[in-house]
Image: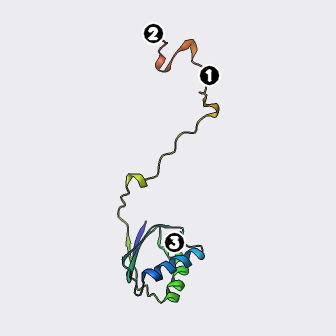
């Protein structure tokens, strides 16, 4: 079950947030496995964070990298508010697209020509069966 995690961070400014993101990328945790959504919001002198994670275990693994960085920047993460995600609504443009069937080599149909000049639907040229 996906989890929504809200942090009301103490001491997180826009500059510290930028530095935190930079350090996470350097540590190979810029796009951690299990996090499907991240948002930072608020005024530049007091930012908060909301993430969506696939599991508590994935979030905790990321926390092993994140927490020392926050501590080094002087940011107190406080106690995160963890809630199960009930529903997600994505815009049509953000939904995964269905895969198109692969084209055959040379664009040819399987099975060769239809017998007797038949077209699809069993009709001959000129509309006769």
User: Vertical placement of 48 versus 115: above or below?
Assistant: below
Where does label 1 land, which residue? 112
Q: Which mark is residue 128?
A: 2
User: Which x, y percent locates residue 13?
Assistant: 42, 83
Q: Quadrant of the N terminus?
A: bottom left
Judged by depth in the image, the label closer to the viewer, 1 or 3, is 1
User: Which x, y percent locates residue 60?
Assistant: 51, 77
User: Which x, y percent locates residue 29?
Assistant: 56, 73
Q: Are marks 1 and 3 in contact (CB under 8 Å)?
A: no
User: Vertical placement of 100 versus 95: above or below?
Assistant: above
Q: Marks 2/3: CA distance?
A: 64 Å
Quadrant of the image occupied by residue 24: bottom right
Residue 110 lies left or right of residue 92; in this view the side is right
Residue 84 lies left or right of residue 110; in this view the side is left
Q: Are marks 2 and 3 in contact (CB under 8 Å)?
A: no
User: Which x, y percent locates residue 30?
Assistant: 54, 71
Label 3: state its secondary structure: helix
Label 1: state its secondary structure: loop
How crowded is the residue under tag 2: few (<14 C-alpha within 10 Å), some, or many (20+)?
Answer: few
Label 2: state its secondary structure: loop
Quadrant of the image occupied by residue 41: bottom left
**Residue depicted at x 51% and y 67%:** 34
Where does label 3 land, which residue? 58
Colouring convention used in this rendered image of the protein? rainbow
Q: Which mark is residue 91?
A: none
Sequence-earlier tag: 1 or 3? 3
The residue closer to the viewer here, 78 or 10, is 10
Question: Which residue appears farthest toward the right when viewing the image?
Answer: 105
Q: Marks 1/2: CA distance?
A: 21 Å
Sequence-earlier tag: 2 or 3? 3
**Residue depicted at x 47% and y 90%:** 74
């Amino acid at each position: 079950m996906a989890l929504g995690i809200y942090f009301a961070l103490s001491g997180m400014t826009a500059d510290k947030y930028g530095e935190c993101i930079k350090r996470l990328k350097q540590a190979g945790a810029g796009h951690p496995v299990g996090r499907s959504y991240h948002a930072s919001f608020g005024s530049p002198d007091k930012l908060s964070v909301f993430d969506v994670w696939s599991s508590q275990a994935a979030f905790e693994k990321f926390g092993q990298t994140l927490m020392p960085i926050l501590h080094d920047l002087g940011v107190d993460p406080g106690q995160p508010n963890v809630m199960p995600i009930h529903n997600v609504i994505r815009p049509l443009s953000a939904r995964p697209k269905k895969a198109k069937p692969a084209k055959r080599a040379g664009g040819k149909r399987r099975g060769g020509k239809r017998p007797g000049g038949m077209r699809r639907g069993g009709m001959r040229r000129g509309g006769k069966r």
